Image (cartoon, helix red, strand yellow):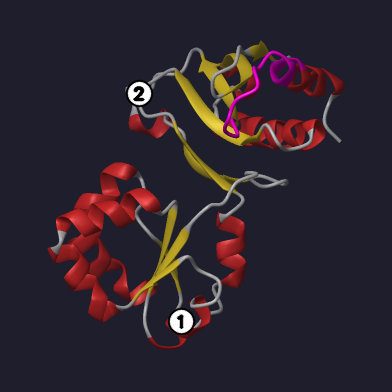
Amino acid sequence: MAEKSTVMAVQKALEGAKKRKFTETVELAINLRDVDLSVPKNRIQDDIILPNGRGKAIRVCVIGGGELALKAKDVADLVITPEELQTIADNKKQAKKIANSIDYFIAEAPLMAVVGKRLGVVLGPRGKMPKPIPPGVDPSNMIDALRRTVSVRTKDKMTFHAPVGTTEMPIEQLADNIETLLKRIEVKLEKGRMNIASSYVKTTMGPSERLF
């Protein structure tokens, strides 16, 4: 169960948001301190599974053939076979369209090098290089986990943001997601919570509410 202070912060953030014609994302903003992000090893790059999901559709593409492609057909949003890979790579416009419309990519392990060579220029800058999966393995569990996953990248900025759900989700679920994400971030930092100067919860276009 989430801490009362986190629940109250989420509640205030939602109450302060105006009614919109679209569903707003609820995000967490974290400000770091005493961390030298010019040193690559100090940067945070992590995929965190939120206990209550993202509250929105997350699209997953599977790149593979044979048994994996057959199993992925009913659970993935897009399946790209090895034969289709080169055709897509040759069409930069189509490759960019796919890269922008898909949140996560899974590739058959033996194809990882080929995917990197042909689509790396498109997927790499977007932080969407595929995650490997053994040939023939049922991808259902991996896809389900990715649909509840948020990717956190600090790069060289002391302030970074991460989505934790949407305004349509229950407050308690959002609070649980926030605390899960914060705990994972703390583990990645040398001094844990001491390296977090402050954190705020806010909706896409609403005011922010400080946590802690």
The Cα–Cα distance between marks 2 and 1, rounded to whole angstroms, is 38 Å
**Which part of the image, by quadrant, shows the C terminus?**
top right
21 left or right, relative to 100: right
Residue 13, horizontal then vertical, whole percent: 69, 17
x 81%, y 18%: residue: 8
Q: Is residue 143 above or below residue 3?
A: below
Q: Which element carries disc 2, helix, strand or loop?
A: loop
Would residue 183 be found to the left or right of residue 21 on screen? right
Task: Give the crowd class for mark 1: few <14, some 14-19, many >=20 residues within 10 Å.
Answer: many
Q: Which residue is found at the position 54% from the left and 19% from the top?
A: 205
Q: Out of 113 and 41, give the one closest to the viewer.
A: 113
Quick check: is 17 in the magenta stretch?
yes
Residue type, label 1? Leu
Residue furthest out toward the bottom: 66
Q: Is residue 109 above or below residue 202?
A: below
In the image, what residue occupies the spot 18% across and 71% down?
87
Q: Residue 156, which numbered label?
A: 2
Q: Which residue is mark 1?
A: 68
Single out the residue that lies furthest toward the front: 21
Image side of residue 44 versus residue 74, left or right: left
